[in-house]
Image (spheres, rainbow, N blue to C red):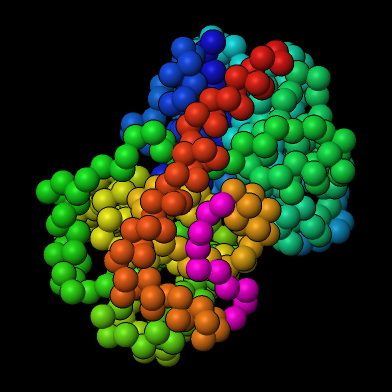
Amino acid sequence: MRIGFVSTRLAGVDGVSLETAKLAQVLEGMGHESFYCAGELSVDSPPGQLTPAMHFTHPDAKALHDAAFGTPHGSRELTRRIYQQADFLRSELERFVSDYSIDLIVPQNACAIPMNIALGVAIHDFVARTRIPTICHNHDFYWERERFLTNGIQDILDMAFPPNLETVRHLVINTPMQRQLYARRGIQADYLPNVFDFATPPPALDEYAASFRAELGLSAEDVIILQPTRIARRKAIEKAVELVRKLDDPRLILLITGYEGDEPGGYGAWLREEADRAGIRYRFIADYVSDQRGEGDGHRVYSLWDIYPHATLITYPSTYEGFGNAFIEALYFGQPVVVHTYAMYLSDIKPAGVQAVEFTHDLTPEVLAQVRDLLDNPAKRQAVAKHNYEVCQTHFSYEKLADVLETVLGRF
């Protein structure tokens, strides 16, 4: 089949874009062709259609978002504007499906979280009218985010986020989402965790990746603690700062790879103040990190895969995650992880047998002792890495992804 992926953004290192690329790769291995349609595409994306109005930062999308949320009162005018924009986006979807002879579409989170309200409505209307086979890959539902709960468009959310239509099948990235979707909407979904190609070992450091430390002015003796996520409040990166402060080891430097700007608020500025007050060594290195290698403002730019091998420990202190793409990525590269016991870790990752240094809210002396033991014991780090890799080969691999896709596609 010719399969069309549709989203607000399919570029960069956010979880939705990364998981979409994995689905496309596995589907192509199964004999299908993949095409993209989104408000942002990367230079190495599959063939497709760039539609800027699909992006959640587009002025029209942002205006509708800001008018719809934060108030319990809707209006006829707001509804009219949403459907007017949805009509335009539906015509763009029709053009994409026609131009690329698409047989099946896969909305990537666009029908789960209303970052672009009109896009979700457009997908619902397009699928209802054409009855095109559709697999909604849902990463975050709106009811899981506080900022979407007060709104003036509940009728639209109930209709389109996500759609309950005869030709639509649903994938969710954790089992609590699976249960909640059925309880709230009566929709049955298949569970598809975040995955990596564990059948293929991670690449060794080449000359380009080996230059990372020198590019940042770090020595071979510096011990890198890596926070490989976006800068967002729910990532609770201040706990990584607190960990480095409490470890009180001059060898340590905290590197924060992610960018900020997807969510409102001044979390990034506050986090820098916290790190300064803590007196730790740290760097925000978003300017050095992209989804592919390149050149920045007078310096090299690296992929996350270039950076992981330089780290000794990964911090993952999030209070909430849909699953944990960066967590599984760290295990792929054989890195030990310090993790806050967020819900999906407890429901789907830990029960698989993964070993990690866990904390719940507080970084206790016991937690610090476990971290110090890992930092100073390469043999133990290696044993944990081997165990976790074997667990992931069974539960979080491309083979797992292929099995789920075969099941869902078979229902059409």
Tell me: 109 left or right of 335: right
Is 356 in front, or is 168? 356
Q: Residue 310: tell me if it is visible.
A: yes
Can you say whether 124 is above or below 210 in the image? above
Give above or below for 331 relative to 280.
above
Q: Which residues are magenta?
A: 353-362
**Horizontal and vertical percent for residue 210?**
16, 54
- Quarter of the picture containing the N terminus is top right
Residue for point 50% across, 68% down:
357
Q: Is residue 275 visible?
A: no
Q: Viewer-proximal residue, 334 or 210?
A: 334
Q: Residue at x 42, y 75 (%)?
A: 371
On whether residue 179 falls in the magenta region, the answer is: no
Q: Position of residue 125 (x, y in %)?
A: 75, 25
Corner quadrant of residue 278: bottom left
Q: How many marks?
A: 0
Q: Is residue 104 left or right of residue 25?
A: right
Residue at image position (75%, 41%) is 178
Q: State the image coordinates of residue 105 (x, y, percent, origin top left).
A: 61, 21
